[in-house]
Image: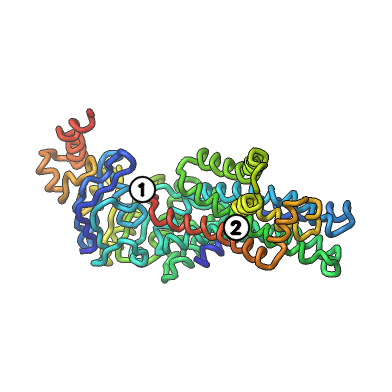
């Protein structure tokens, strides 16, 4: 598996898109820091960008990589290599190289700006950690979608729909249900509903670390009470981890049963 | 007995491709797997390689069942039908990579010289012509020393010189006691190389035997016509009309 991972990783690092993605974060990091002149504010703006962008890029890269390397995968399948290792290696290669672009692209400008001397270092690390989680989650989900659909167009469609649902539609449904059921106590419901969507969960996690939760009103206070504690933090991390592991298991399951 | 297949069934959706194939492949001989388009040749080969998972049936390779196994593929060199390699890497890197993945001794130098691939080693695979890609494909397959060779349409795109070299190579491997499975639509090539013919039709083995036996059974004097007779025989005509 490590060999496959090595080759996928090299292959991706050499491709133009990894550089574009890396440069995008590099420029974004520099621009935000110089416009805001404040690490904390830059972290908030960054959060809004990456919380939507990372899932999108992860989904599209994952699907594209799977379909583009299909023939090569067939060549590998005829070699004495375990099936699961082939797909795990490719998955880790894609997710790993995207995460590297993210961490380096954002890390360099922030380090140069003097992150280590600022108080925002924990917020910033949290941003990178959730960003990496989101990358692994969405690359995993897109691999599962791609391996289940022989038809490229269908696979692409489902993957983009999934992103759209989790990034946009889910929030809409969530808000609507809050309005419809406003007569009832909704604390637990909103907590659980937030937990079930990795994008929302990441957003809340970062927001609450940023001390702007006072603006969120009563629900914000409840969220703060839950997520602000160590237990809440650990539970959230555990759920992000579940979101990462489930697609990987799905990928393994599908890989073992597919005909090539 | 190198390969033993018993009662192999495979269905893709509603399309039943293999309907109970029984086949034994003995050591040290060249088998040609023939049949019209869509008769299940590639599915049969991919089942042996474990790329297609049969619905029913039993396959053993070198006396070991292959179900859920992968180490046995170390004993097989496979030449895939369409060589689509990753476009961004060089020929040299691809050869190095497959060597690294298989981790077995390989003799790629002689093969590169044999097919005159030296000048292409530093070129990217996307810039190669179809025939040159097939030569790379052949080098990747023959550079290892495995007891079983599976060649899916090995002659595609080759120039006459390369074709002669390929034939010599196959005969050399046979004299080393290797078992070779070939599929091809070039009957002249099959007639020259094969010891045994396995003719697949509608997902089952319709004929298995030597070329003289085939000629005798069909009453044809030329091999090409004998195969054509098999293809247009009554049984097949009935089935294709449906």
Nearer the viewer's eye, disc 1 or disc 2? 2
Q: Dot 1 lies on which element?
A: loop
| Chain containing mark 2 | A
Residue B157 position, x and y percent, is 41, 45
The residue located at (78%, 62%) in the rendering is A108
| Chain containing mark 1 | B
- Give left or right: position of A164 versus A251: right
The residue located at (65%, 48%) in the rendering is A185
Instruction: Provide the residue designation for mark 1.
Output: B155
Q: Can see residue B125?
A: no
Instruction: Provide the residue designation for mark 2.
Output: A136
The coloring applied to the image is rainbow
Please determine if labels 1 and 2 lie on a single subunit. Answer: no
- Give left or right: position of A227 versus B34: right
A249 up-or-down from A175: above or below: below
* Callout 1 crowding tier (Cα within 10 Å): few <14, some 14–19, many ≥20: many
The residue located at (19%, 42%) in the rendering is B223
Residue A160 position, x and y percent, is 59, 42
Pick the residue in front: B37 or B131: B37
- Give left or right: position of B28 versus B53: left
Real-space Cα separation, disc 1 to disc 2, in angstroms? 43 Å
Pick the residue in front: A44 or B102: A44
Q: Dot 2 lies on which element?
A: helix
């Amino acid at each position: 598996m490590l060999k496959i991972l090595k080759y996928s990783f090299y292959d991706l690092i050499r491709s133009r898109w990894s550089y574009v993605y890396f440069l995008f974060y590099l420029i974004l990091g520099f621009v935000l820091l110089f416009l805001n002149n404040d690490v904390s504010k830059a972290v908030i703006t960054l959060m809004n960008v990456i919380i939507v962008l990372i899932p999108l890029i992860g989904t599209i890269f994952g699907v594209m990589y799977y379909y583009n390397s299909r023939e090569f995968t067939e060549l590998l399948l005829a070699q004495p290599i375990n099936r699961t290792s082939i797909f795990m290696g490719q998955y880790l290669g894609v997710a790993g190289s995207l995460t590297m672009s993210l961490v380096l692209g954002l890390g360099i400008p922030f380090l140069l700006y003097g992150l280590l001397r600022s108080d925002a270092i924990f917020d910033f690390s949290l941003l990178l950690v959730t960003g990496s989680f989101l990358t692994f989650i969405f690359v995993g989900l897109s691999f599962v979608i791609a391996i289940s659909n022989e038809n490229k167009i269908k696979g692409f469609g489902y993957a983009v729909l999934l992103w759209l649902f989790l990034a946009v539609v889910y929030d809409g449904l969530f808000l609507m249900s809050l309005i419809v059921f406003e007569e009832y106590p909704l604390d637990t419901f909103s907590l659980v509903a937030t937990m079930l969507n990795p994008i929302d969960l990441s957003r809340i996690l970062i927001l609450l670390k940023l001390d702007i939760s006072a603006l969120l009103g009563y629900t914000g206070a409840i969220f703060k009470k839950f997520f602000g504690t160590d237990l809440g933090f650990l539970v959230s991390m555990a759920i992000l981890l579940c979101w990462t592991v489930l697609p990987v298991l799905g990928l393994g399951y599908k890989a073992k049963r597919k005909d090539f | 007995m190198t390969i033993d297949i018993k009662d192999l069934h495979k269905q893709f959706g509603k399309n039943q491709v293999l309907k109970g194939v029984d086949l034994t492949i003995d050591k040290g001989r060249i088998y040609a797997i023939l049949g019209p388009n869509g008769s299940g040749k590639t599915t049969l080969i991919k089942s042996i390689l474990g790329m297609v998972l049969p619905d029913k049936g039993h396959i053993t390779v070198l006396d070991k069942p292959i179900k859920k196994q992968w180490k046995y593929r170390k004993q097989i060199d496979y030449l895939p039908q369409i060589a689509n390699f990753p476009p961004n890497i060089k020929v040299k890197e691809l050869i190095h990579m497959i060597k690294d993945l298989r981790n077995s001794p390989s003799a790629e130098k002689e093969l590169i010289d044999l097919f005159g691939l030296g000048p292409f080693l530093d070129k990217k695979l996307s810039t190669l012509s179809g025939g040159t890609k097939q030569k790379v494909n052949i080098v990747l397959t023959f550079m290892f020393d495995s007891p079983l060779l599976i060649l899916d349409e090995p002659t595609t795109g080759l120039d006459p010189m390369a074709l002669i070299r390929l034939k010599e190579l196959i005969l050399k491997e046979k004299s080393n006691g290797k078992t070779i499975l070939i599929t091809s639509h070039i009957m002249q090539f099959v007639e020259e190389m094969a010891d045994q013919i396995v003719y697949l039709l509608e997902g089952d083995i319709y004929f298995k035997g030597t070329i003289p036996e085939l000629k005798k059974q069909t009453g044809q004097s030329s091999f090409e016509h004998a195969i054509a007779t098999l293809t247009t025989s009554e049984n097949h005509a009935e089935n294709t009309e449906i």
